[in-house]
């Protein structure tokens, strides 16, 4: 319950309460002078903030992130009486992105104060020594640095990572904190959606994080806790309720996550310059392709032979791409007239012995459907042709996107030197 102007609280119950505890959250101070000016500037509209340079390995530009000093973090709360950090930062490769809501008031007049209150609650009341979220986003679309990671160079935008690109461990999803990034939307989203500005900021942050760490935004993969060894398979962009018994991030907002995942994927594709290319024969839609190495984006290689788009398998270091993804799009008019969807995969040049499956994304269920395979044996046995006339529009998004992929069982499934993976779509 949020009651900003309340001076007194009355608790009523029709049963005996052996104990009642009322927790008052306060940011502990009023900002003045330089601090007040910094906080006001930090929470101004994003257009007034100087854009940050993208110094990461991601093709997606890192959005502007307001540092902890911008929302008035009292850094003394992170230290004990001996001057030692209560919760020293620990860093691990990022595997998942988990979205929350803070269950605080909507139409928040002072987001920085709310963040300070959450910080005090996590760091002092809970005894954690810091705020649990890695990032927070207000209704105006401002993105704030959460959990402390390190001291940044002048002009460097907070990344929540160490110099090796590993993410700092937060405290936002019990049992799933290490190797994940917790992003909290300020407000309560149980019966209302995020504001357009907050949603846009969230998608920009998710796109940067996903591309930076090679995460498939529309996939579900095995998560392994690097500390406890706990394993679970859930969406790569997940809601808090996907990993815990909670209503977070709010029912209304949670229902929009499939669309957010699709939007994030589109942002990443656009940043990589994944342009569509027209090709023949007549009757085939425009096709675009992307190549990934172990869910990490590598160079896209295209060759148009006049009848199909060829996607050359890519090599990253000494490893070969194990998963190849391609996307095809059609207009809304074509989708409404769709009577049959056909996908062909020519695997005759793929390395022998590695099992392959053809998978198509079902937009009605939000899952990848294995439609053919696994195929093993000699190379010519591992070509696929799949066609459906039963609700083919299930495999086409409202924006007209079709997703399909060939997945290999090991890193030698495709080889740069010899393999050309060919996809065609007809309707």
Image (spheres, rainbow, N blue to C red):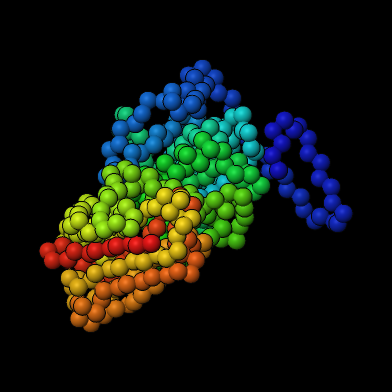
| Point 56% across, 38% down: residue | 195
Q: Is residue 106 left or right of residue 425?
A: right
Q: Is residue 370 above or below residue 53?
A: below
- Quadrant where the N terminus is found in the figure: top right
| Point 21% across, 78% down: residue | 380
Pick the residue in front: 18 or 25: 25
Most distant residue in the front direction: 282
Residue 358: image location, x then y, percent: 34, 70
The total of numbered circles placed on residues is 0
Name the image quarter holding residue 114: top right
Q: Is residue 2 left or right of residue 148?
A: right
Most distant residue in the bottom direction: 377
Most distant residue in the left direction: 417
Pick the residue in front: 181 or 193: 193
Name the image quarter holding residue 46: top left
Residue 154: image location, x then y, percent: 31, 29
Residue 139: image location, x then y, percent: 55, 35
The answer to whether residue 172 is visible is no
| Point 22% across, 59% down: residue | 307
Q: Is residue 6 left or right of residue 91?
A: right
């Amino acid at each position: 319950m949020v009651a900003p102007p309340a001076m007194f609280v009355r608790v009523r119950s029709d049963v005996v309460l052996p104990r009642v505890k009322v927790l008052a959250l306060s940011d502990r101070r009023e900002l003045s002078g330089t601090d007040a000016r910094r906080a006001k500037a930090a929470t101004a509209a994003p257009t007034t903030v100087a854009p940050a340079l993208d110094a990461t390995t991601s093709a997606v530009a890192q959005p502007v992130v307001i540092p902890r000093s911008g929302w008035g973090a009292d850094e003394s709360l992170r230290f004990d009486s001996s001057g030692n950090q209560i919760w020293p930062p620990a860093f691990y490769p990022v595997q998942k992105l988990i979205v929350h809501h803070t269950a605080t008031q909507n139409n928040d007049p002072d987001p920085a104060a709310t963040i300070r209150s959450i910080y005090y609650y996590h760091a002092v009341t809970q005894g954690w020594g810091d705020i649990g979220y890695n990032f927070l986003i207000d209704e105006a679309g401002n993105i704030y640095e959460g959990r402390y990671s390190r001291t940044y160079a002048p002009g460097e935008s907070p990344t929540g990572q160490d110099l090796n690109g590993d993410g700092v461990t937060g405290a936002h999803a019990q049992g799933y904190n290490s190797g994940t990034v917790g992003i909290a939307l300020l407000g309560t989203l149980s019966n209302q959606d995020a504001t357009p500005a907050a949603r846009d900021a969230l998608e920009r942050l998710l796109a940067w994080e996903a591309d930076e760490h090679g995460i498939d935004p529309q996939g579900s993969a095995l998560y392994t806790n690097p500390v406890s060894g706990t394993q679970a398979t859930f969406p790569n962009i997940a809601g808090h309720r996907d990993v815990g018994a909670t209503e977070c991030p709010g029912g209304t907002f949670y229902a929009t996550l499939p669309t957010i995942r699709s939007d994030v994927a589109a942002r990443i594709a656009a940043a990589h310059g994944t342009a569509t290319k027209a090709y023949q024969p007549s009757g085939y839609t425009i096709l675009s392709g992307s190549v990934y190495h172990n869910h990490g984006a590598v160079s896209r290689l295209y060759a148009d032979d006049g009848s199909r788009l060829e996607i050359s398998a890519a090599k990253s270091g000494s490893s070969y791409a194990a998963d190849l993804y391609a996307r095809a799009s059609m207009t809304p008019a074509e989708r409404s007239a769709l009577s049959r969807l056909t996908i062909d995969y020519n695997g005759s040049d793929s390395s022998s012995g590695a099992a392959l499956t053809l998978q198509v994304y079902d937009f009605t269920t939000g899952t990848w459907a294995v439609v053919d395979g696994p195929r093993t044996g000699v190379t010519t046995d591992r070509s696929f042709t799949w066609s459906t006339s039963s609700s083919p529009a299930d495999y086409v998004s409202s924006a007209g996107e079709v997703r399909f992929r060939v997945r290999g069982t090991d890193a030698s499934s495709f080889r740069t030197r010899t393999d050309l993976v060919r996809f065609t779509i007809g309707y």
